[in-house]
Amino acid sequence: MAIDAATVRKVARLARIAEPEEKLEPLARELSGIMSWIEQLNEVDTDGVEPMTTSVAMTLPMREDVVTDGGDPAKVLSNAPKTAKDFFIVPKVVE
């Protein structure tokens, strides 16, 4: 896929990037090179290859899902700016 200076100018305008006119042609050549390299990836045979989200197969450790009382309220509220009767006091955000 060949990218010309007009395409680079249009994409730069859409992306709100100010690019000087003398840099458009070199940038177009560079982007064309990148696109041709990406097109080479279409030649790779990926039949039978499972999609993956990471290169390392691993499972996340699970913890027991248990309801607790939250521990010691004094510890939980120790860093709160304002509290009242073991509750956080937060500013009103909805009228």
Image (spheres, rainbow, N blue to C red):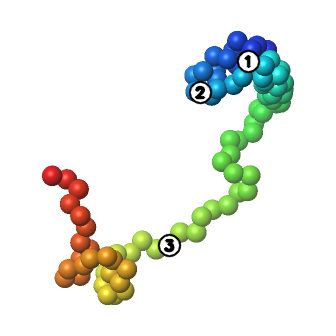
Asked if disc 3 and disc 1 are in contact, CB closer than 8 Å, the reply is: no
Q: Earlier in the sequence, mark 3 or mark 1?
A: 1
Q: Secondary structure at mark 2?
A: loop
Residue at numbered disc 1:
21
Residue at numbered disc 3:
63
The outermost residue toward the left is 95
Estimate the spatial distance between the alpha carbons at disc 2 and disc 1, rounded to whole Å.
16 Å
The correct choice, above or below, for 9 with respect to 70 in the image is: above
Report the residue at 76% width, 32% height from top.
Answer: 47
Q: Earlier in the sequence, mark 2 or mark 1?
A: 2
Question: Would you say residue 70 is visible in this rendering?
Answer: no
Asked if disc 2 and disc 3 are in contact, CB closer than 8 Å, the reply is: no
Q: Which amino acid does the dot numbered 1 rest on? A: Glu
Q: Which amino acid does the dot numbered 2 rest on? A: Ala
The correct choice, above or below, for 86 with respect to 33 in the image is: below
Tell me the tag on residue 33: none
